[in-house]
Structure formats: structure tokens, C-alpha cells
Image (tube, grey):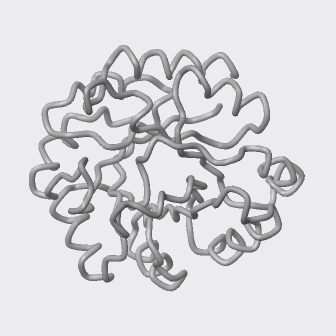
């Protein structure tokens, strides 16, 4: 089954979609520079409404280990997505404390080769539960806003990963995904999961009908 993560939730959002078996994770952004920022203490009531089958992931950028642990404790998230320059050692330290750890790696169009992507994955594969390949952010944005820009990377770079995929950690794809274009990605490459934020929004907030459309689009491939 291809899994789905809905990222960038806010307090007050409808989370009834988390009962879907396709939606295995949700994400909350704890990056103050992001327009989707939520304070950890304000996220806790939201995460308490998420279905027990769906894991809440804290999205952070370049926090210290202690800061990351504080965010996890205050929010109640049981997993963390490290979206900055965090070293493998920090991933291992968080896993040793019982948290699910994802490492986001940026993919730069026209610059990185598939081999470079694989080498970057290898640097983290022994200390994470999943790797998220995301489109590198535009140069014009704040340095800490490393995701959620609504732009996709060149998916053809994923082709050479197909043969290596069984030996790699679970691979998730993010960046510019929508209910309309995710079939194109999944026809080209079948990751373990897809991560969507802006692609299921209307007027800057999560839209239930867009989320349900994404669930249907992903389900067709299973």
C-alpha cells in the first residue's frame, strides 16, 4: 500500500480523514518562519483528535536535540521529520529515545544526479525510519522554510532508484503533489508514501474535499 501523509495542519482543522487507512501520518509545522507554523502547546489538542491509526509527525528545521525533544513533549507528536541540516547522529539519538525519525533531503532540479541522491540517502539510512525526498526550496524564501512551496522536482531522477529501492529505507516523495498530478508520479515511480500540503489546500487551509480526492487518487494504485 502506498501511504499518505497530510502535512501542515492547523488547530481547528477537520481531521476526520485520519480514519482512512491510506492516511497513515499527519504533519504539523513547528518552524516559526513558516506560514503554517503552529506552537507546540497549541498543537496538542489537535493531535489528540487524530485517529489512533494515524501517526502525528512534528516537522522541524535545525533544532538542537534538546529543542526537538521539547517540541515532541509539548505537542504530543510521536515522530519527527528533520527538514534541515541535522546530522545522522541526531537522528540516532532521537530514535534511541523511542521516536519515529524521518529525514527530509532536498532534490535540486538540473543539479543532482540519481547517484548523488542515493549517496545522500545512504548517509542516513541506518539511523532513520524513512527518507523524504522533497523539492529544494526557491532561493527567495527564508532559509528555514525548506518545504511546502508547492513545486515539484524532476521525477525522472527517481528512475535509477527503482532497482535500489528494496535496500533503501522507506522512501517518501513530497513537493508540488496534488490529486491531479500524483497519478503521474505513481505511474513513474512507486514510493512507500507521498506527502502533501499545499496541494490539498484552499485559501491557505486544508480542504476536506481536496484531501478526499488525494486519498482516492492514491488508492487507485493499490
At horizontal 70% and vertical 46% (from top left) the residue drawn is 154
Query: In the rendering, at what x and y percent does residue 52 appear?
Result: 33, 37
Query: In the rendering, at what x and y percent does residue 7 appear?
Result: 37, 42
| Image position of 55 with respect to 108: above or below | above
Left or right position of 12 against 170: left
The image quarter containing residue 76 is bottom left
| Image position of 162 with respect to 198: above or below | below
The image quarter containing residue 75 is bottom left
| Image position of 11 with respect to 66: above or below | above
203 or 29, which is in the foreground?
203
Count the marks.
0
At horizontal 27% and vertical 73% (from top left) the residue drawn is 69
Left or right position of 152 against 161: left
Query: In the rendering, at what x and y percent does residue 203 appear?
Result: 25, 27
Q: Residue furthest bottom?
A: 89
Left or right position of 179 against 149: right
27 or 49, which is in the foreground?
27
Quadrant that contains the C terminus = top right
| Image position of 17 with respect to 121: above or below | above
Q: Residue furthest front?
A: 140
The image quarter containing residue 18 is top left
At horizontal 44% and vertical 65% (from top left) the residue drawn is 83
Amino acid at each position: 500500500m502506498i501511504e499518505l501523509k497530510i502535512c501542515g495542519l492547523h488547530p481547528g482543522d477537520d481531521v476526520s480523514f485520519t480514519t482512512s487507512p491510506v492516511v497513515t501520518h499527519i504533519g504539523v509545522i513547528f518552524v516559526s518562519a513558516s506560514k503554517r507554523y503552529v506552537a507546540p502547546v497549541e498543537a496538542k489538542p489537535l493531535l489528540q483528535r487524530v485517529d489512533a491509526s494515524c501517526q502525528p509527525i512534528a516537522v522541524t528545521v535545525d533544532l538542537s536535540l534538546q529543542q526537538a525533544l521539547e517540541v515532541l513533549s509539548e505537542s504530543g507528536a510521536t515522530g519527527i521529520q528533520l527538514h534541515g541540516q541535522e546530522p545522522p547522529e541526531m537522528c540516532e539519538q532521537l530514535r534511541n529515545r523511542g521516536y519515529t525519525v524521518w529525514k527530509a533531503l532536498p532534490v535540486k532540479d538540473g543539479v543532482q544526479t540519481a547517484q548523488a541522491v542515493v549517496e545522500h540517502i545512504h548517509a542516513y539510512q541506518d539511523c532513520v525510519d524513512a527518507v523524504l525526498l522533497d523539492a529544494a526550496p526557491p532561493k527567495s524564501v527564508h532559509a528555514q522554510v525548506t518545504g511546502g512551496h508547492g513545486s515539484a522536482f524532476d521525477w525522472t531522477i527517481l528512475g535509477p532508484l527503482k532497482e535500489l529501492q528494496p535496500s533503501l529505507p522507506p522512501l517518501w516523495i513530497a513537493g508540488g503533489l496534488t490529486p491531479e498530478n500524483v497519478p503521474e508520479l505513481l505511474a513513474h515511480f512507486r514510493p512507500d508514501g507521498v506527502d502533501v500540503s499545499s496541494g490539498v489546500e484552499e485559501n491557505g487551509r486544508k480542504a476536506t474535499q481536496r484531501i478526499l480526492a488525494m486519498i482516492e487518487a492514491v488508492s487507485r494504485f493499490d
